[in-house]
Image: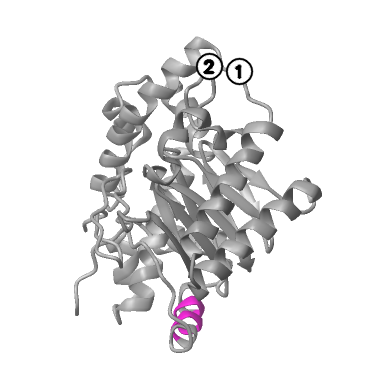
Amino acid sequence: MDYRSIDNAGIEQSPLYQKEKLDPSFPFRIVDSAWRNYFYHWHEVLEIVYVMRGRISTFVEGQVFECEKGDIIVINSCDIHGFFGADVDNTLMIIQIGLEVFEQTLVDLRDQFFHKLVFDRKLFISPHEDPALHKRFEALLLTMREEYKEKKEGYRLALRSKIYEFALVFIREIPERIMQEKEIIHYKSRHEILERVFSFIYDNADNPDVTLEEVANAAALSKFYFTRFFKEQTGQTFHDFLSRLRISAVQEYLIETDLPITDIAFRCGFSSLKTFNRVFKTFVNVSPSTYRIGQRNLSNKKKIRVWNPVGITTF
């Protein structure tokens, strides 16, 4: 089984890097989407996610955010992130902004010591934890959505002004975090390590005998250090990540094919049905057969956009 694939928009996926294709004349877009899972990746564009309905777990730079309606997630350029465990009926407003929008002002958006864009200063904005800041950002995002949707005369100018206003709040009102030199070195090297790690995992996820030691060797790290490193970078253990990856593949097979559940379990790297049923229930909260029926009924009513980490052929 191939755990590398091409997403619904036809964009080739590496284990991490994703090339976003925005309009070069104005690199900006807003889409309302529903996700089930979208595995770890990074891209150069700035991404802002506003939860309009439902719940979803979001992982950004090793932090885990349990998001619900109204929450805002800011994903900086080149931040590693992913989405998991969404409600069946969820809707996310996703805003993607190419850095070209900022033109010559881009230099003002970089932190003095870390030299990353200032959007790393605040990744998660909740109406419960930061009501005043959330109210400002929510109003800006909803205004952007309205301008983008209606496309009245001058809408690009209006959007650019709101984008700049959003950035200005980060520059002037959210304090910079000073990083030590060793943290900067670690940041620069971890992408390379994670590329090797995810490449190995995606190539071997359907092997029920793949071990933590093998993945650590692929990363050229000791088992002890790799265990800590992986948890810091992804917010979960290697075994939880592997299980989540396999269950995501199972979910796609259950929806998109008529294969027997037993066959699907073994194709996706599970060595026993007992283990498969337990892990599936842990992550999805229902049995595989119940999930298949419920998702197919929903799919007939609502199209759900998913990055599928499994290349499923037609049967």
Q: How many marks?
A: 2
The residue located at (67%, 32%) in the rendering is 172
- Circle 1 residue: 178
Labelled pair 2, 1 in contact (Cβ < 8 Å): yes
Residue 308: horizontal and vertical position, in percent? 33, 62
Q: Quadrant of the N terminus?
A: bottom left
Please name the residue shown 24% across and 68% down the image: 312
Q: Which residues are the magenta region?
A: 290-296
Horizontal side of 105 relative to 164 (left or right) equals left
Q: Is residue 291 in the magenta section? A: yes
Residue found 69% across the figure and 61% down from its top: 70
Q: Name the residue nearer the viewer: 279 or 110.
A: 110
Q: Is residue 280 found left or right of 271 in the rendered image? A: right
Which color mode does the image show? one colour
What residue lies at 45% left-to-right and 46% top-to-bottom?
Answer: 241
- Residue on which the image places disc 2: 113
In front here: 153 or 56?
Answer: 153
Q: Quadrant of residue 10?
A: bottom left
User: Type of residue at label 1?
Assistant: Ile
- Residue toward you, 212 or 37: 37
Q: Secondary structure at mark 1?
A: loop
* Residue 234 on image: x %, y %: 48, 39
Residue 245 at x, y percent in the picture: 39, 53
Q: Is residue 188 visible?
A: yes
The verdict on residue 79 being magenta is no
* Main SS class of the magenta portion in the image: helix
Q: Can residue 42 be seen from the camera position used here?
A: no
Residue 108's label in the rendered image is: none
Q: Secondary structure at mark 2?
A: loop
Mark pair 2, 1: CA separation: 7 Å
Pointer 2 or 1: first along the chain:
2
